[in-house]
Amino acid sequence: MNWSPLTQQDQIQTIIEESKQAPVIIFKHSTSCSISATAKARLERQWDDAGLENVKPYYLDLLSYRSVSNAIAETFAIMHQSPQLLLIKDGECLYDASHMGIRLDEVKKQVA
């Protein structure tokens, strides 16, 4: 899995534009939380077999870039959670899950 770092608020507009060509996921991760670390490791283990080769994954370190997380919540009208996975397609958030509710098979259904 090749994460693209999400570190600046202006990247949100870039992600919206990218999502009009191919789906994008954003994984919001708290580096001090064991549940978040478990969710991230699970995502990375499952990624290669998930059939999501055309989906670009972004990684957001919540502790370093909380303002970016707040801007994401506002832009896509979703409640902030951590860990959290968002699927952005055609400029819209089509999937939003947190903690152990994050499921790549559900992401795949939205992408298909």
Image (cartoon, grey):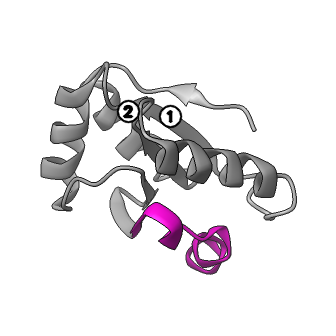
Q: How far across and down, in percent of the image, does residue 74 sit?
A: 12, 49
- Residue 97 colored in magenta in the image: yes
Task: Point out the image quarter for the N terminus.
Answer: top right
Magenta stretch, main secondary structure, is: helix
Within 10 Å of disc 1 (Cα), the crowding (few <14, some 14-19, many 20+) is: some
Amino acid under label 2?
Answer: Thr
- Residue 11 colored in magenta in the image: no
Q: How far across and down, in percent of the image, does residue 81 sit?
A: 28, 54
Q: State which tag comes first along the sequence, 1 or 2.
A: 2
Chain part drawn in magenta: 96-112
- What is the distance, in whole Å, between disc 1 and disc 2 at their CAs? 14 Å
Q: Residue at x 35, y 63 (%)?
A: 93
Q: How many marks?
A: 2
- Residue ID for mark 1: 59
Question: Do the CB atoms of the residues marked 1 and 2 lie less than 8 Å apart?
Answer: no
Circle 2 — which element? Answer: helix
Q: Quadrant of residue 8?
A: top left
Q: Residue at x 72, y 32 (%)?
A: 2
Circle 1 — which element? Answer: strand
Which residue lies most toward the right here? 49
Within 10 Å of disc 2 (Cα), the crowding (few <14, some 14-19, many 20+) is: few
Residue 27 falls left or right of residue 71? right
Q: Is residue 8 above or below residue 89?
A: above
- Residue ID for mark 2: 14
Q: Nearer the viewer, residue 56 or 69?
A: 69
Task: Point out the image quarter for the C terminus.
Answer: bottom right
Amino acid under label 1?
Answer: Tyr
Q: Nearer the viewer, residue 16 or 96?
A: 96
Q: Is residue 83 above or below residue 65?
A: below
Q: Residue at x 31, y 25 (%)?
A: 63
Q: How far across and down, in percent of the image, does residue 7 sit?
A: 36, 20
Q: Residue at x 35, y 56 (%)?
A: 91
